[in-house]
Amino acid sequence: AEKSAARAKEIESVTSPQASFSKKTSSESSSGNEHKLEKLKQEYRRLRKEVAAAVLSKDQAKLKQERAEKERDNLMKTNVRLLKQGSEKDDMNAKSLSTILHLKQRNEELEKENAIIKQKAQAAQQLSLAARLASNAKDRVGEEALREK
């Protein structure tokens, strides 16, 4: 607003009607010329107001544009930050998923190993039982052989 007021004063000082019409000749003092002069002065004031309004409007538009550019810059910074966060989250999710899949696979391997160990333990128990039964049978056979002699 201060800039537009300064520009309006500058325009007024350069194109002032008082500077161009201050030297009147005696022939211009007639009522027709005075009427024309008054009309010119009115038109000059009207045009000066229009110029001042246009300058003010232009300055306001510049301020509005600057605010919009600042807002755009802020939005772009926010967008970059959010995109970076999204990328980091995607990376973290991918790593987590990879870890989950690896642990799931390892769990399945351990369950298979556990099943194999259980089978071996059962086989060992059966073998132990069979060995005991065989030992008992051998002892009986030995006892029977001694009795028969």
Image (cartoon, rainbow, N blue to C red):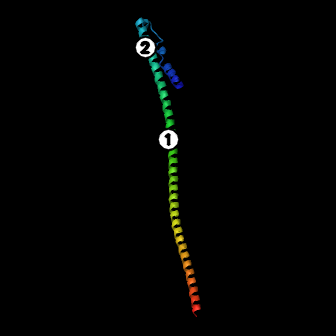
As displayed, is residue 77 above or below residue 2?
below
Q: Quadrant of residue 2?
A: top right
**Residue at 52% across, 25% down:** 1
Quickly name the residue at label 1.
76
Task: Kindly identify the amino acid type of the residue bearing the numbered disc 1.
Answer: Met
| Local SS, label 1 | helix
Q: Residue 101: x, y in percent?
A: 50, 59
Observer-nearest of 70 and 27: 70
Task: Kindly identify the amino acid type of the residue bearing the numbered disc 2.
Answer: Leu
Q: Residue 137: x, y in percent?
A: 56, 84
**Residue at 54% across, 73% down:** 122
**Residue at 48% across, 14% down:** 18
| Local SS, label 2 | helix
Q: Residue 41: x, y in percent?
A: 45, 13
Quickly name the residue at label 2.
40
Q: Earlier in the sequence, mark 1 or mark 2?
A: 2
